[in-house]
Image (tube, grey):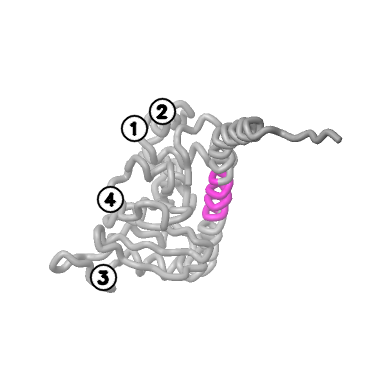
Amino acid sequence: MKYFAFTLAEVLITLGIIGIVAAMTLPAIIQKHRNQVVEAKLKKFYTTMNQAVRMAEVEYGDMRYWWEDLSGATFEEGKPVPGSSEAEKWFNKYLGKHLKIVRQEILAASGSFIVYFADGGALKQMNNGTTRDWVYYPNPNKCEINLTAVNRKGVIGTCGFSFQFKPDANSGTFKRIYQKGFEPWVYNWDGKEETLKDGCYSGSDLNFCTEIIRANNWTVPKDYPYKVH
C-alpha cells in the first residue's frame, strides 16, 4: 500500500502563505468593524441628543430662548470647585434628564464637565468657557478626553467628534445651525464640500470631519484619511 501525505516543508509553506494573507487582510477587516461601530454610535448620538432637545422644548418652549452660553467649573488652588459649573447645571436641567446618563464628572485638567452614557459613549464640553462646542466620544476609554484645544490631531475626527449647539444665531459664523439642535461642527463654513474636505483631510480644521461623515449618511467615506475608533 502507498500512503500520500504532505511533507513538512509543504505544510510550512502553506501556513506561511495563509499567515501572509491574514496579515494583509485582517487589519482592513478590523478597521471596517471599527468604522461600523463609530458610524452606528454617531448616528445614535445625533438622534438621541436631538430627541432630548425636542423634549426640552415641550417643557420649556423654543430652544432659542432657553439655550445659554455658559462656563464650566471655577478653580480654587488649582482645583475645580464642586458644584460651580453653570454649564453642568444648565445641561442637567434641560437635556440631562432626557438622556441615559450613568455618571458625570468635572475634569480636573480643564474644569469642563463630561457625561457618560449607558451605551459607553460620552459627551464633553470642548472647553470650559462655552456650551456652544462639544466633543462626542464613542469610547472615551480609548481616547484622550482631557482635551483643551479644538483641533487636536489624533483625537478630533478619529476618536472624538465635534458638535455644536447654538440655535439662536441667524447670521454670522453660526447661521448654518440656526434653530437646529446638536449639529456637526460647521463654524465659519462657507457651504462648499471642498472646504470641509480641505479642513478635515489636511488637518487644518479637524472639527469639520463630523460633518463629512454626516453628509455621507453617517458613513465614514472610503477616502477618509484617519482610522476612526
On whether residue 143 falls in the magenta region, the answer is no
- The residue at the far left in this view is 77
Labelled disc at residue 204: 1
What stretch of residues is rendered in magenta? Answer: 34-46
Precedes in sequence: disc 4 or disc 1? 4
Residue with the mark numbered 2: 198
Q: Nearer the viewer, mark 3 or mark 2?
A: 2
Which label belongs to residue 148? Answer: 4
Mark 3 and mark 2: Cα distance apart in space: 39 Å
At 45% from the left and 67% from the top, the residue drawn is: 96
What residue type is disc 3 on? Answer: Ser
Is the C-beta separation of discs 1 and 2 under 8 Å?
A: yes
The disc, 3 or 1, on the residue closer to the chain's N-terminal end is: 3
Q: Earlier in the sequence, mark 4 or mark 2?
A: 4
State the CA–CA distance, disc 4 to disc 1. Answer: 17 Å
Per the image, the residue denoted by label 3 is 84
